[in-house]
Structures are given as structure tokens and as C-alpha cells.
Amino acid sequence: MIVIVGPTAVGKSELALHLTKYFPAEIISADSRQIYRYMDIGTNKPTPAERLSVPHHVIDVVEPDQDFSLAIYHQLANEALKAIQQKENLPLMVGGSGLYVWSLVEGWKIPQVPPNQKLRDQLEARAEQEGSQRLYLELQDIDPTAAETINPNNTRRIIRALEIYDATGQPSSQLQRKEVPDFPILLIGLTQERSELYEMIDWRVDRMIQRGLVEEVEQLLEKGYSPSLPSMSGIGYRQIVQFLRNEVTLREAIDRIKYETHRLARHQYAWFRPGDNRIHWFNTSKIKAGVNLTILNKVKRLVESFIS
RNA sequence: GGAGGGGUGCCGGAGUGGUUAAUCGGAGCAGACUGUAAAUCUGCCGCCCUGACGGGCUACGUGGGUUCAAAUCCUACCCCCUCCA
């Protein structure tokens, strides 16, 4: 499997599409937002034409009001992977959702404990009243290892750890395993100087507006999707909803989308570190239109030697 | 021409004599992460020295002044905004 990682807007998809011209590849998306149907512009999904020319997996897999999670992603991506491998095509994973990427690349075994909404509501209410510290103390008691890595203020993660204990009687830290995949993986990372990346992001956000992001959000609202859904809380959607409710001007909404996307890019670097030597990094700084020929050729050679 | 309001750190915006390098928000920087992950959460954030404690320097439009002490009071000047004409 080839995996292309990096922050949003560096040109991962573009590079991937170029590669599919030279190799019989199919793309597996590792993007936590492109999974939602009807959310095309704001998530910068590949175009219908692109998706017609190359099979794309794990895109448009759920309705905006359906639950999604790492575990579901893990399963879908694994199924796609097996199917591609059976066809003897080259699986090409592309995406910026670090959690999703590493879960596959490192072969995480995710604790099979689906969300227990009743328990969650209950614990959330308690956190509200008694403070998350109280829950944290309980977690320390039953799962000290997990408690060590969870901040006492991070109610959401405390609750999940408690939820796992509630369901299995075991500390979540005991259930976390890795099973390294039995096939070789080539990791390619794209990076770019920070200020240039921010410019690319800003440009792309402006284009999303031109392409009709506001209308896309209006349509989602018309279809009855609540702004409080996780899907609608994604960057671009949340801010446009605020604009449509007259809480901010369009100008402000656009600025916020840009800033939030900058933050997203920074967070993505926490998952894909330029110092991580498992990743073959390519710097696209100073290159106007994303991926240029030099980099494409280098990557091509790398892939060629990898598959031979 | 007349009346009034205001100039604070990258931006917005508190603060009206000392405990203020200056609440808070944004931006920026750094980090955690195994069923919400574009989520949730954490740290830093004037400059210089220090790993940290701490120390030094410069700061609230500009120049004077009052005071032991001023972003906060007085004064002159510059600039901005609103209303009336």
C-alpha cells in the first residue's frame, strides 16, 4: 500500500491522481469529513470526473446525520483494502486524518465497545454537576494507565475510558493492541512552508465560496440536517451556518474558516511529523500549482522501486 | 463652524493612581490523542538572559507636568469617530 499524508491543501489528492496514471491504483480516502454525502464543496471532495477515472473508497459512505467513528472507518477501509489487493491493484491511501491513517498503517486493534449513549448522557450530566474532576478520580481508580494520558479536563476522553470499563470490566489501556500489517507500506509525506500553506488554504477557501459553499449549506439545512450534528460542525459548515443565521457577516465567516483551517493544518502536523523517518517527505514550497513535475518524478521513482 | 466620544500589546477589547507586562477573546506557536478526531483537551504567547525559579529592559498616540508611585490625574499638541450646521 502507498500512503500519502500531509496537511490539508498541500496537494495530496493531486499527487495521488497523477500517480494513478502510471500505476493501476485505487484510492482509499482517509478523511474524516469526506465520508458524509452531500458535503462536497466544504470537504473538498474529488470531483465526479476524478472519481469516475479512478475508484475512490470510503467517500460518501454515510448520511450527514449518521454516526461515524474510527472503528467504522477502520472496518470500511480494511474492506476496501482487501478488495483492492484481491484485484491485484495498488491501494493508495490519501488523507489528512492522522488518527485514521495510523490506525490502518500501524494495524491498531480498536476496542470493540460501541458508544453507549445512555451512559454517556448520564456521565456528561454528572460531569456538568460534579465537575469532570470527579469522573477523573474514578478513572484513576479503575484505569490508572489511561488516566495518565488523559487530561482531567478532557471530559470526552474520560467518559470513553469509563465506557470501555463499564462494558468490558477491563481498563481501556489493556485493550489497546497493534498488529503490524503483513504487507509493505510506503509512506509519502507532502509538506510546505507554513506561510505558503496558509496562502494555499486561504485561496482554496475563497474558491469554495465561489463554487457555492453557502448554497451547499443552505441545501443541507433544507434537508433537515441540524447544525448540531457532528457532520455540520466541520470547518466551513459551522461558520456558514452562523452566517445564514445572521450571527456573523460573510466576511467574518470566511475569515474564521481560514483561521480554523490553519489550525487544522497545524494539528495535522502533530500526526505527520517532518521528523518521522518512516515517512518519505517532499517539500512543495515555492511551487505555485501544487505538485510539479520534479516532485512527481521523484515520487514515481520511489513508488517504482517500492513495488518492484 | 458648533457639540460630544475616543486613541492600550499582531488584531479586537478590558482596565481609571500602587498588588499591571497589563483581565479576556482572536490570531500565532507548541503538544496530547485507539468508536464524536475538521472532535475533545493542554501549555506558551512584549524583548533579552535562564532548563526552571528568577533577573534586566521597553511599553498603554506625542511632548511636558503633578505624585514616593501614572495606562490611569493635569496640560499642550497630533490623529480618529459620531452628531448638529
Image (spheres, rainbow, N blue to C red):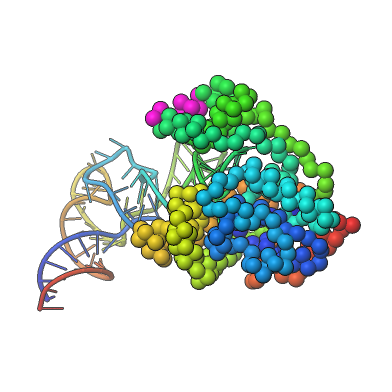
Residue A45, given in percent of the width and then of the height, sits at 61, 62
Q: Is residue A219 above or below residue A231?
A: below
Residue A124 at what x, y percent from top left?
45, 33
Q: Is residue A128 left or right of residue A102?
A: left
Task: Please give the count of numbered marks on the rendered protein.
Answer: 0
Q: Say if the magenta span includes residue A136.
A: yes
Indicate the quadrant containing the C terminus of chain A: top left, top right, bottom left or bottom right: bottom right
Residue displayed at 64% across by 71% down: A288
Foreground pick, A90 / B27: A90
Q: Is residue B20 left or right of residue B54?
A: left
Please tell me which residue is depicted at 56% across the width and 36% down the height of the picture.
A115
The quarter of the picture where residue B11 lies is bottom left
Query: Taking A7 as reference, is A178 left or right?
Result: right
Q: Is residue A93 visible?
A: yes
Name the foreground residue: A67 vs A281: A67
Q: Most prominent secondary structure in the magenta stretch? A: helix
Image position, residue B28 (x, y; %): 52, 55
Q: Please tell me whether residue A298 belongs to the stretch shown in magenta.
A: no
Q: Is residue A269 visible?
A: no
Q: Position of residue A77 (x, y in %)?
A: 70, 49
Q: Which residues are magenta?
A: A129-137
Q: Quadrant of residue A108?
A: top right
Q: At 83% from the left edge and 56% from the top edge, which residue is drawn?
A: A87
Residue visible at 49% across and 33% down in the picture: A118
Of all residues, the one furthest to the right in this rendering is: A308
Closer to the camera, A139 or A46? A46
Q: Tell which residue pokes out farthest to the front in this image.
A: A223
Q: Is residue A104 above or below residue A251?
A: above
